[in-house]
């Protein structure tokens, strides 16, 4: 049986007359889930997290944590803990004292504090750093101390607000994998706020994509990447080529130059849509006879080539006004195209989706 850790019903948060930061959000997060709230700056994800934490109260709607109505309960009376982007460690205390501070405030006895602090430090892989001052730690190590300080209280739900935001890319990627491992190890529910789609895709069991205070889609990483429900999700999660089109028949669309393309459609015949396809799902051939049969093929010419190291991205002009990008993995023997080459862009009908707002 699945147990719901956090549930939001009709949660709206207004600031003053004009700002609707969170707009009628319904959401259920399951026990043990790594759930990310993903969206652009200002979409309401931090406010949603703060409402779960009890740092803000909803204007309308309700929050339940493990089936208990939270009402106006303050943060320290909720079974949650929050890790923020700024670590706010006490500079005059060593690592172990920082981690154990909350337990000491609760008058937990010394031997218990030592045991739990030891476990938490071990969990975040900081054994040996107990006596260090925060000043003598790297950014990544400081963030681990902040994480240990939150985990030591054994919250049922850990709320994380862009905790890796201040770290450089390489360290962030390492910490993403470690955070996921730690979450597996402790088995508690993580609710993670980020604007970084790569981060959300790699770590989450499910993602809630937010736009203007609303949940645009909730699903697994694969769901939101492979089957975005609307143009906002398609454009925000990963890269996407967009071509204006009209639904010709169920299962096919007409591009601006009249070309018919097979695609996943749910809009009626005649509807104006945007044909979406991921750059890595497109292939380039020199002639139509080289391309596999029974797929979509578009004539184009290479207008740009960009080298990214692990891949190359070609800008391809399609017809008179449209252009798309094709990402090709940089592997030995792969054919390189030059600006001006006339090519065929090939893709599977399943890779193409016709979407609307
Ligand atoms: P970011 O990634 O930039 O932190 P976010 O998605 O977390 O953005 P929120 O911080 O939840 O967004 O803010 C949502 C909206 O509510 C924004 O327009 C913001 O300006 C507004 N807002 C947030 N807190 C307040 C406040 N205390 N008073 C007034 N407006 C606020």
Image (tube, rainbow, N blue to C red):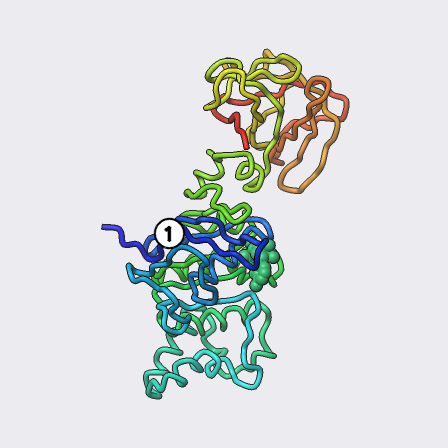
Residue 329 visible in this rendered orientation of the protein: yes
In the rendered image, the residue lying farthest to the right is: 340
Point out residue 56 in the picture as x, y percentages from the top left corner.
Answer: 47, 64
Above or below: residue 41 compared with residue 272: below
Q: Nearer the viewer, residue 27 or 39?
A: 27
Write the residue at 38% across / 54% down. Answer: 8
In the rendered image, the residue lying farthest to the front is: 17
Above or below: residue 287 compared with residue 45: above
SS at badge 1: strand
Q: How crowded is mark 1: few (under 14 residues within 10 Å), some or many (20 or more)?
A: some
Q: Nearer the viewer, residue 171 or 24?
A: 24
Above or below: residue 279 compared with residue 260: below
Q: In which quarter of the image is the C terminus?
A: top right
Report the image quarter containing ligand 1: bottom right
Residue on which disc 1 sits: 9
Point out residue 234 in the picture as x, y percentages from the top left corner.
Answer: 54, 36
Write the residue at 56% across / 86% down. Answer: 92
Q: Left or right: 307 with respect to 229?
A: right
Point out residue 222 in the picture as x, y percentages from the top left corner.
Answer: 44, 39
In the rendered image, the residue lying farthest to the left is: 1
* Ligand 1 lies under 8 Å from the Cβ of mark 1: no
Q: Nearer the viewer, residue 127 or 281?
A: 281
Q: How many labels does the image show?
A: 1
Point out residue 266 in the picture as x, y percentages from the top left corner.
Answer: 45, 24
Q: Left or right: 160 with respect to 2?
A: right
Quarter location, residue 109: bottom left
Write the residue at 50% across / 50% down. Answer: 200
Residue 352 visible in this rendered orientation of the protein: no
Q: Which of 133 and 227 is in front in this view?
A: 227
């Amino acid at each position: 049986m699945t147990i719901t850790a956090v549930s939001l019903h009709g949660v709206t948060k207004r600031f003053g007359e004009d700002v609707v930061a969170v707009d009628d959000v319904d959401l259920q997060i399951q026990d043990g889930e790594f759930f990310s709230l993903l969206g652009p700056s200002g979409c309401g994800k931090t406010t949603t997290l703060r409402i779960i934490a009890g740092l803000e109260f909803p204007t309308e709607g309700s929050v339940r944590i493990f089936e208990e109505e939270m009402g106006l309960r303050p943060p320290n009376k909720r079974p949650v803990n929050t890790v923020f982007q700024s670590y706010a460690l006490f500079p005059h205390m060593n690592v172990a004292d920082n981690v154990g501070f909350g337990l000491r405030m609760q008058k937990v006895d010394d031997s218990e504090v030592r045991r739990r602090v030891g476990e938490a430090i071990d969990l975040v892989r900081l054994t040996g750093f107990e006596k260090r001052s925060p000043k003598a730690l790297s950014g990544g190590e400081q963030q681990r101390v902040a994480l240990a300080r939150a985990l030591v209280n054994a919250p049922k739900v850990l709320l994380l607000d862009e905790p890796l935001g201040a770290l450089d890319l390489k360290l962030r990627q390492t910490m993403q994998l470690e955070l996921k491992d730690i979450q597996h190890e402790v088995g508690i529910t993580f609710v993670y706020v980020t604007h970084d789609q790569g981060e959300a895709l790699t770590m989450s069991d499910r993602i809630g994509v937010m736009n203007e205070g609303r949940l645009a889609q909730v699903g697994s990483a694969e769901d939101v990447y492979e089957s975005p429900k609307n143009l906002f999700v398609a454009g925000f999660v990963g890269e996407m080529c967009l071509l204006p089109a009209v639904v010709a028949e169920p299962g096919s669309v007409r591009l601006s130059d009249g070309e018919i393309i097979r695609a996943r459609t749910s809009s009626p015949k005649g509807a104006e849509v945007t044909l979406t396809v991921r750059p890595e799902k497109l292939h380039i051939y020199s002639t139509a006879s080289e391309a596999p049969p029974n797929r979509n093929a578009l004539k184009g010419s290479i207008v740009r080539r960009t080298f990214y190291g692990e891949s190359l991205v070609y800008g391809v002009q399609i017809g008179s006004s449209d252009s798309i990008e094709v990402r090709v993995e940089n592997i030995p023997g792969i054919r390189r195209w030059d600006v001006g080459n006339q090519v065929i862009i090939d893709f599977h009908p399943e890779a193409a989706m016709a979407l609307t707002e």
